[in-house]
Image: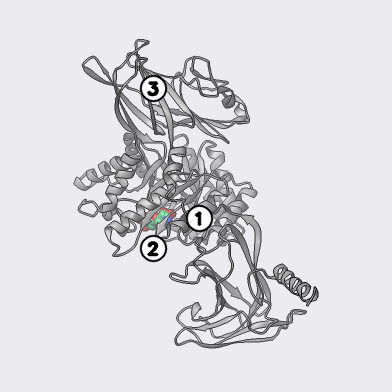
């Protein structure tokens, strides 16, 4: 047969690859080849291929619905078993119109079980339009699960026209989650959450050889949080609520009291009473609280926009948003370190739509907040990312806002789960967000599945905690409450109304306070050194001095990669950094440093210097650290955190003027 047929086959293959690599016959030039027409019971319709009235387009696919069904998917054309890689992103593009203005639903989904994936409701008109959805990923990272693309039209009778349907590889790679990612969680935890620490114990400047020492992690650097709804009625439940919160968590967020509609029920009369009450309690617990949320563009119901915003002109609405953001961030400057500046922009569209839908208000929210408190970290927050995979739209919105100048410091993922999720899908969705490059907080986790066995619920919580804690981009996991009687999704609570524990409460405690915590009782070596591998965070150290245990009065912060060494002197109560292995020069060069944050010894942010401030942290040969520059810091003890591209270093510093 020679060369000819071979050449012919190769050419056909190349042409197919160039025009439509995944979808077969997406332009309907080959009749209905490759397309399946699917009806669910009760619905009726047809699929035909007819000449298109779009110039030069040849044929198009025509779906006619004569009897509608209960949902879009009752009448579908689809292609199944598509070759979609888990490590790539795709654009889905197509032309469509209908016999009258009406919607259909595009589903890029799993071909089995829960049929989850990306769903887009698309409104068609009588004119041909091209639609494009970008940044899409495989509905399941498991390549054994088939993928299908469906055009579902069953909710409306009439005629729908489709043409030039393509799935295009965007040439962008996402980091694939390998099968053994979860079983390697402990390796990542050891790498990202722990360090090798040495504490040298002294008394009146002399080392205390062979003394007994107890080392207890009091607060993990990773923020294990909960939404908080406290009451001023100090009854038994309230006491248990507060005690339980302190015992299980180290950080929190306002469930409702910081929301605009709660704080400013009457325009221009903001009420800070509740928030201040929460903050006073958080101080007593040694917690930070996140400001949830500055703007939630939800319609004026159930904690969305304040009701009075409904009657404002657009200009007055923008002014009210500006006042809200600037006033509250100024009020809590230095007190709240972070905000969900913008909540649920993909879903709660009232505010932006009212203002024309161009997202300009979103960028302004971040700019107003930054201007009011440059040190506050500003997060965007959204749901349906980890579970329902709406990640492509989220990343493109974040990127659009960042490019428009919005100072977004981190990405919030809510994590309200409703299903027995598959760990790998959740991890892959998280990784997709992480690949954008900003820090991530899990801001509102709960698992709401009615009738689920308790141990299954506990297993799901533990699995998700492992996913989040082992991922280096994640720095917090906040649960959306813990007690059934004060829980938005009571099925997800760790404690029942009568305060008996669900199994998940023990899993939570075990992981956070045992498996991922450091507690040791040991004896120092002949030079007074206690060396150990521990979790990053704030430690309490007790030393046996003669017959008496003495608890060292200052918190000892141990964190960072490589070996960290501190000296403590139990007679003077001072902490001194002694860290010969710390590369001081890398800390003080501009290339390393993004910013220096200064905390008081209770961990509250005092101030933050960016690069331009010219402040330097210098570690001397004797291991003592000092801050240089116009620091304007009062004399006293601080904890300084230097953050840069290679991570963060935390050191105690004494400021003496
Ligand atoms: C919820 C609260 O838990 C409820 O008490 C309130 O009635 C409505 O809001 N996503 C968010 C949270 O960002 O603010 C919501 O909190 C839950 C969903």
Characterize the local packing of mark 1: few (<14), some (14-19) or many (20 or more) Cα atoms within 10 angstroms. many
Q: Is residue 146 left or right of residue 60?
A: left
Q: Assess mark 2: CB under 8 A from ligand 1?
A: no
Q: Which residue is mark 2?
A: 419
Q: Which residue is mark 3?
A: 199
Q: Is residue 616 left or right of residue 650?
A: right
Q: Residue furthest front?
A: 1
Q: Is residue 84 visible?
A: yes
346 in relation to 129, above or below: above
Residue 567 image point, x, y percent: 40, 19
Q: Which residue is mark 1?
A: 428
Label 3 vs label 2, nearer the camera: 3
Residue 200 image point, x, y percent: 38, 19
The residue lying toward the viewer, choosing from 488 and 180, is 180
Tell me which numbered mark, 3 or 1, is placed earlier along the sequence.
Answer: 3
Q: Assess mark 1: CB under 8 A from ligand 1?
A: no
Give the SS element for disc 2. Answer: loop
Tell me which numbered mark, 3 or 2, is placed earlier along the sequence.
Answer: 3
Gap between marks 3 and 1 measured at Cα: 39 Å
Give the SS element for disc 3. Answer: strand
Q: Residue at x 62, y 26 (%)?
A: 589
Q: Assess mark 3: CB under 8 A from ligand 1?
A: no
> How many numbered discs?
3
Q: Residue at x 28, y 40 (%)?
A: 247
532 in relation to 576, above or below: below
Gap between marks 2 and 1 measured at Cα: 16 Å
Q: Is residue 328 left or right of residue 250?
A: right
Q: Is mark 3 in CB contact (under 8 Å) with mark 2?
A: no
The residue lying toward the viewer, choosing from 194 and 247, is 194
Tell me which numbered mark, 2 or 1, is placed earlier along the sequence.
Answer: 2
Give the SS element for disc 1. Answer: helix
């Amino acid at each position: 047969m020679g060369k000819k047929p071979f050449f012919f086959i190769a050419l056909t293959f190349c042409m197919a690859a160039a025009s439509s690599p995944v979808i077969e016959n997406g332009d309907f030039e080959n009749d209905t080849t490759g397309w399946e027409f699917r009806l669910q019971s009760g619905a009726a319709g047809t699929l035909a291929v007819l000449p298109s009235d779009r110039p030069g387009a040849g044929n198009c696919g025509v779906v006619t619905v004569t009897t509608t069904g209960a949902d879009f998917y009752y009448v579908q054309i689809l292609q199944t078993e598509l070759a979609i890689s888990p490590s790539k992103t795709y654009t889905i593009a197509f032309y469509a119109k209908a016999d009258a203005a009406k919607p259909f639903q595009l589903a890029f989904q799993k071909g089995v079980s829960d049929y989850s994936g990306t769903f887009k409701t698309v409104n068609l008109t009588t004119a041909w339009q091209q639609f494009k959805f970008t940044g899409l990923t495989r509905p399941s990272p498991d390549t054994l699960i088939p993928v299908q693309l469906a055009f579902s039209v069953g909710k409306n009778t009439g005629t729908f026209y489709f043409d030039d349907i393509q799935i295009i590889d965007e040439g962008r790679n996402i980091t694939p989650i390998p099968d053994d990612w979860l079983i390697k969680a402990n390796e990542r935890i050891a790498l990202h959450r722990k360090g090798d620490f040495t504490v040298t114990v002294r008394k009146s400047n002399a080392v205390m050889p062979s003394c007994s020492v107890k080392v207890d992690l009091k607060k993990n650097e990773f923020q294990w949080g909960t939404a908080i709804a406290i009451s001023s009625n100090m009854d038994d439940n309230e006491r248990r609520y507060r005690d339980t919160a302190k015992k299980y968590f180290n950080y929190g967020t306002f469930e409702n009291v910081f929301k605009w509609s709660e704080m400013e029920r009457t325009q221009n009369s903001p009420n800070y009473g509740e928030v201040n009450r929460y903050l006073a309690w958080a101080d007593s617990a040694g917690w930070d609280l996140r400001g949830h949320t500055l703007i939630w563009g939800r319609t004026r119901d159930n904690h969305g926009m304040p009701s009075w915003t409904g009657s404002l002109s657009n200009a007055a609405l923008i002014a009210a948003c500006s006042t809200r953001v600037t006033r509250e961030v100024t009020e809590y400057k230095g007190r709240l370190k972070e905000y969900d500046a913008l909540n649920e922009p993909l879903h709660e569209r009232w505010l932006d739509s009212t203002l024309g839908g161009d997202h300009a208000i979103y960028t302004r929210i971040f700019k107003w907040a930054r201007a009011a408190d440059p040190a506050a970290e500003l997060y965007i927050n959204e749901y349906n990312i980890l579970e329902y995979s709406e990640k492509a739209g989220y990343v493109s919105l974040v990127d659009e806002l960042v490019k428009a100048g919005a100072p977004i410091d981190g990405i919030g993922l809510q994590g309200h789960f409703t299903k027995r999720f598959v760990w790998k899908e959740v991890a892959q969705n998280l990784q997709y967000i992480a690949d954008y490059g900003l820090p991530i907080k899990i801001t509102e986790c709960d698992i709401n599945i009615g009738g689920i066995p308790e141990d299954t619920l506990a297993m799901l919580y533990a699995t998700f905690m492992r996913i989040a804690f082992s991922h280096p981009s994640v720095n917090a996991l906040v649960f959306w409450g813990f007690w059934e009687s004060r829980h938005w999704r009571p099925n997800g609570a760790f404690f029942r109304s009568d305060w008996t524990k669900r199994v998940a409460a023990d899993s939570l405690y075990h992981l956070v306070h045992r498996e991922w915590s450091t507690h040791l009782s040991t004896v120092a070596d002949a030079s007074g050194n206690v060396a150990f591998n521990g979790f990053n965070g704030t430690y309490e150290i007790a030393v046996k001095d003669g017959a008496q245990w003495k608890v060292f009065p200052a918190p000892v912060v141990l964190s960072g990669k490589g070996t960290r060494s501190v000296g403590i002197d139990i007679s003077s109560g001072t902490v001194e950094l002694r860290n010969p292995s710390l590369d001081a020069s890398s800390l003080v060069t501009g290339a390393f440093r993004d910013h220096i944050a200064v905390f008081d010894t209770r961990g509250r942010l005092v101030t933050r210097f960016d690069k331009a401030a010219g402040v330097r942290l210098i570690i001397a040969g004797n291991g003592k650290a000092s801050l240089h520059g116009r620091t304007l810091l009062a004399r006293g003890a601080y904890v300084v955190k230097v953050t840069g591209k290679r991570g963060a270093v935390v050191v105690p510093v004494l400021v003496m003027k």
